[in-house]
Amino acid sequence: MNTDSCRAALPGSATLASARRKSAIVTNIPDNVNPARARKVFRKLVLVLTLLLHSVSAGQTAPPSAPTGFTLDTGTIEGATFAIARPAQWNGTLLLIAHGLRDDKAPLLPDLNPGQLAHRALLDQGWMVAKTSFRRNGMVIRDAIDDLENLRAHIEDTYGKPQQVVLEGDSMGGAIVTLIAEQFPEHYQGAIAVDVVLQTRKSKDPLTFNLQPQIPLVFLTNQSELKGPRKYVSAPFDQQHKALILEVRREGAGNVSQRERLVALRTLFDMIERQPIELPIIAGAPPMFDATVEPVPFTSAVRPLAEGGFEARVTEVDEIESTVVLNAQPSDFSAADIAPDTWFELVAKGQTYRASYGRSPASVKPGQWVAFPDADGFCELKQRPSRKPAASQTAASIPLKTGDPVVVHRLSGSAAAEVP
């Protein structure tokens, strides 16, 4: 269908006069925000963030658990499937999520995970969290904007009008919510674009970024995806609501943590409330702040094995990316004497695989398995995509589900170092 292009020649970045711990960048409160409601929800969110970001100490905290007291509603609107996590007592605030680019042949799934830390924290505070697939995959920006608006309207018709709606999107989804913030803001109060891709384009009837958001806009981005947002916020256009960047000092597309997403939400409400941004400002840059939150170690949840290694459990399955998250942490691999960039034995569903303990999926060749730390401090397991599975692999994927056990054994001697 249609995708959208960033303006071809974005201006270069401006510089700040000096570095300060806080900035007084503010925006006007949008006309469609209930100020009293915004302040009430903002205070609750600050409390949640304070508990999550400052009261967690190493070795004293269990891994995140699934939220309780919510209902998951699902359905389909014009071919787009949706999921709505609805708390028992809704506070009137809605987080509406736009997903990133998907392969044309991928299933049309909303893949909403209420157990993720950010969603769990919001649900516990009475937020509604909703996500939709788009009516088809690929570059479908215009249809995606319609599908998000259809879901918002469905929520209003079914549960009542939200007091405020916040948008969040990753990658292509970040471009979608940026365009909504600029050109279709009527029903929304703010937007967060995570590792946004602003350079994608398609010649057929493209939408074009006008670089003038009409509602507060936050770019949450790591160092790999910083170029586009820097040019956007440096644009010398009259912006009714100034966009700003929260930089995560970490490499890797999409490599931001759940706590950093909560920091972005808090910052967005600072903008809505016209409050100073309570984050370290980055010198020599356009409006940009350091939002990095280092992962906090948890008490180990794996089961050590007498013969060496450990048994971990699957805590999350991403059907779109064919990735599973384990309750294992880097310290568990270290305790099992498995060093970074070495190979280990993986046993799952009665099958044995050889996997690398790497730094990202790019650490291995296509078709090979890799476990790597994520931004939240746990380890993800993935087979790097390949058109033809590697000869040493007996399956293109492991059919794991949440709660399944996975056994990790150390390989000794040269077997741990040799590349298959």
Image (tube, rainbow, N blue to C red):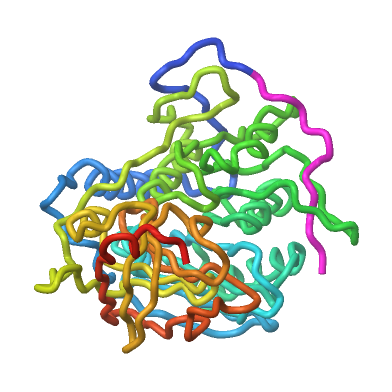
For the question of whether residue 381 can be seen, the reply is: yes
Residue 274: percent from the left, percent from the top?
48, 32
Q: Which of 32 and 342 lies nearest the eye of the viewer? A: 342
Q: Nearer the viewer, residue 295 or 397?
A: 397
Q: As displayed, is residue 80 above or below residue 125? A: below
Q: Nearer the viewer, residue 87 or 59?
A: 59
- Residue extending farthest top: 17
Q: Which of these two is toward me, 301 or 219?
A: 301
Q: Residue at x 38, y 82 (%)?
A: 400
Q: How far from the left and from the top, in percent, is residue 366?
A: 57, 67
Q: Is residue 327 magenta?
A: no
- Whether 318 is drawn above or below 107: the answer is above
Instruction: Please give the name of the residue rendered at 13% of the width and 69% of the height, measured from the top-left corner.
Output: 304
* Residue found at the far bottom of this picture: 350
Q: In which quarter of the view is residue 264 placed?
A: top left
Magenta-drawn stretch, dominant element (helix, strand or loop)? loop
Looking at the image, which residue sits at the far front? 414
Is residue 283 rendered to the left or right of residue 65? right
- Viewport quadrant of the N terminus: bottom right
Percent position (x, y) of residue 305? 13, 73
Describe residue 127's horizontal placement relative to residue 56 as left or right.
right
Q: Residue at x 42, y 85 (%)?
A: 399
Q: Estimate the x, y position of residue 353 in percent, counting from the top left.
A: 39, 77
Q: Is residue 91 visible?
A: no
In this rendering, the count of numbered labels is 0
Q: Magenta span has 4?
A: yes
Q: Residue at x 55, y 10 (%)?
A: 17
Q: Which residues are magenta?
A: 1-14
